[in-house]
Structure formats: structure tokens, C-alpha cells
Image (cartoon, rainbow, N blue to C red):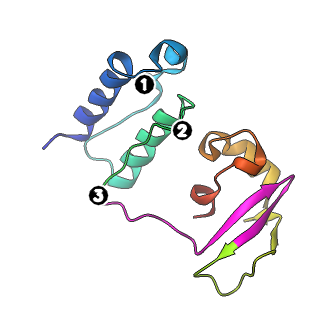
């Protein structure tokens, strides 16, 4: 079984030697900005690897773990301007389709969009994926 540090080194090697988009994204590849240690939690490790891969701005790059349970907050949203609109509700009884979210933990959607721009995976508000932020 590979250690977390070995896995991160393997991912770096793949991104430098085998990744088809390497030439276009070599200026974005900065593994030195990320620290991976064998004693970090599984969640911290997955978040670090995800952050590293998000630097490449390629929606086809992802890293997962069989141990990680997908997080679904029970509803889906779509951003329009500076608000999130509930577009689907399956497991959340306090929301209905059409509800508008303008603040999360006292922070505006616009500000959260700026803070989490990389995780939202798109600069076009209507295409942003807010699942990771909502959890």
C-alpha cells in the first residue's frame, strides 16, 4: 500500500510526464505550494490533492477515494447574479424549489464566489458547482 506522500509524488509525476494538457498548464503546476504528510487525515489529504488538481483548470481531472462518502446536502442550487436559487430538493424538508439563498453563514454569495472561485470550477456563475461550498 502506498503512503500519502508517495501518492502525491506519483500524481505530480503523472501531471509532469503523462498529462495531455501539460504544455498548456505547466505554468499552473506548483506542487511546492501543497504539503502532504502521511499522518494527515484522509479528508485533509483528499482536499489537498483536489486543490492541487484544481490549479490545472481542467474539469476532467479529479481524485477520489473509495472511503469517502459523497456529500450531498439534500438540495441543488444554481447561481444567478449574487444569489443561489434552489432548483431541486430531494432530502431537505426546510427548502422548496425556488427558494433564494443570499447569505451563507453571514457571508454574501458574491464574496463566497470570490473566496472559493477555484472550487466552483467555473467563472460563469450559472455554471458553478456549489456542492462543495454548501457542505
Could you classify mark 3 by the number of other residues whose Cα lies within 10 Å: few (under 14), some (14-19), or many (20 or more)? Answer: few
Q: Earlier in the sequence, mark 3 or mark 2?
A: 2
Q: Position of residue 17 (x, y in %)?
A: 33, 16
Residue that protrudes farthest toward the right in the picture: 81
Per the rendering, the mark at residue 59 is 2
Could you tell me which secondary element the residue under label 1 belongs to? helix
Q: Quadrant of residue 119?
A: top right
Identify the residue shown where x is 30% and y is 39%.
37
Quote the CA–CA distance across marks 1 and 2.
Answer: 18 Å
Closer to us: 105 or 109: 109
Q: Which residues are magenta?
A: 67-87
Horizontal side, residue 120 vs residue 23: left or right: right
Question: Quadrant where the C terminus lies?
Answer: bottom right
Is residue 69 a member of the stretch shown in magenta?
A: yes
Mark sitting earlier along the chain (1/3): 1
Would you name the residue on which mark 1 appears?
Answer: 31
* In magenta segment, residue 27: no
Residue 66 is tagged as 3
Residue at (28%, 27%) from the top-left corner?
Answer: 9
- Residue 88 x, y percent position in the rendering: 68, 73
Q: Which structural element holds mark 3?
A: loop
Q: Residue at x 22, y 32 (%)?
A: 6
Please report contact status of discs 3 and 2: CB closer than 8 Å, yes or no: no
Mark 1 / mark 2, whichever is N-terminal: 1
Amino acid at each position: 500500500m502506498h503512503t500519502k506522500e508517495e501518492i502525491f509524488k506519483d500524481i505530480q509525476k503523472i501531471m509532469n510526464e503523462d498529462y495531455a494538457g501539460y504544455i498548456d498548464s505547466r505554468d499552473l503546476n506548483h506542487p511546492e505550494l501543497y504539503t502532504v504528510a502521511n499522518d494527515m487525515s484522509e479528508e485533509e489529504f483528499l482536499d489537498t490533492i483536489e486543490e492541487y488538481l484544481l490549479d490545472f483548470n481542467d474539469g476532467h481531472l479529479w481524485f477520489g477515494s473509495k472511503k469517502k462518502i459523497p456529500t450531498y446536502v439534500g438540495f441543488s442550487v444554481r447561481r444567478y447574479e449574487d444569489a443561489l436559487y434552489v432548483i431541486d430538493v430531494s432530502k431537505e424538508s426546510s427548502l422548496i424549489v425556488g427558494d433564494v439563498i443570499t447569505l451563507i453563514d453571514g457571508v454574501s454569495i458574491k464574496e463566497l464566489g470570490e473566496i472559493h472561485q477555484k472550487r466552483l470550477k467555473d467563472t460563469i456563475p450559472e455554471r458553478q458547482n456549489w456542492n462543495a461550498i454548501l457542505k
